[in-house]
Amino acid sequence: MAIDYNQGHIAEQYQEAKKQAWRDRVETYSFMNRIGDITGKKVLDVACGEGHFTRLLRRAGAARVVGLDISERMIALAREQEAREPLGIDYIVADARSIVDQEDYDIVVSAWLLVYAQDRAALASMCQGLACRVKPGGRFVTVTTNPGVYSFRPDYRKYGFEVELADAVFEGAPIDITVNLADSSLEVRNYYLPIEAYASAFRAAGFHDFAVHIPDLEPAAETVDEGDYWDYLLDNPFLVVMDCVRD
């Protein structure tokens, strides 16, 4: 179920999927909170898609923000938004796995990139591509599927998406996600790898201080009439945030 974001309306569906409430209340809040203060920093958003987080990073005070994605259609959508509302963001089409001369970004971020690594070799390739883009002492922060979903086999239907798992867990086991949209559905396949595989891949690529963080709920969500609506998602988190520091 590999996704080609250049085909049909996949890119637009992915853009629509970002509007689901949990993406703002939990995903965006947790990710941006972990990224922290980026005032005056040079930031690269890898696998930026149509630029959702790229724009947030610029508005958060980063001095320079670049968005990188392998999908020409996704970058086209990001550039269209930049044309409508200029923020001074540069968008480029490139493969995150490509090895380049050491770049000097203070922080590199990525949402939902590592989920496509089906095995340790694929993960290692991604981490090596990321490492050459972060300056020594710089940080990498990512939001990714929680490998723990295989331990609690969750039901996220009330949040607008469903997860289907294999009968047994193994490295490379599929995590099939169906996002229910207004007039259609978006199907995405992620892959399971244990936390240890991520720690090992980052260490081998030249990172240290690897850490995994469970998501938090945006404080504002606790003040509206949502009761215990978010409890299940927080107790059985679909995502985790990982971060590490470049050697």
Image (spheres, rainbow, N blue to C red):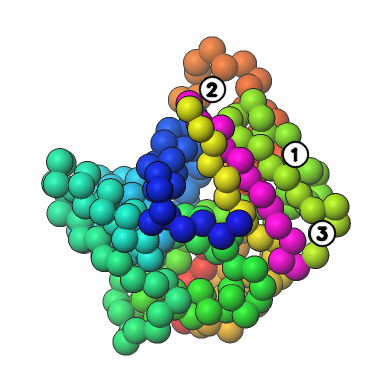
Q: In the rendered structure, which amino acid carries the disc numbered 1? A: Pro
Please say if the residues under marks 1 and 3 sit with CB atoms less than 8 Å apart: no
Could you tell me how far apart the alpha carbons at marks 1 and 3 are, in whole angstroms? 14 Å
- Left or right: residue 26 compared with residue 48: right
Which of the pair 31/183 is nearer the observer? 183
Q: Earlier in the sequence, mark 1 or mark 3?
A: 1
Instruction: Residue at 54%, 22% (x, y): give it.
Output: 222
Please tell me whether residue 115 is drawn above or below residue 149 in the rendered image: below
Chain part drawn in magenta: 171-182
- Left or right: residue 79 compared with residue 31: left
Disc 3: which residue = 169
Please say if the residues under marks 3 and 2 sit with CB atoms less than 8 Å apart: no
Q: Earlier in the sequence, mark 3 or mark 2?
A: 3
Disc 1: which residue = 154
Query: Residue 112 location, x and y as percent?
Result: 51, 55
Q: Residues within 10 Å of mark 2 (few under 14, many from 20)?
A: some
Q: Residues within 10 Å of mark 1 (few under 14, many from 20)?
A: some
Could you tell me how far apart the alpha carbons at marks 3 and 2 are, in whole angstroms? 35 Å
- Which residue sits furthest top? 225
| Numbered disc 3: secondary structure | loop
Q: Residues within 10 Å of mark 3 (few under 14, many from 20)?
A: some
Q: In the rendered structure, which amino acid carries the disc numbered 3? A: Val
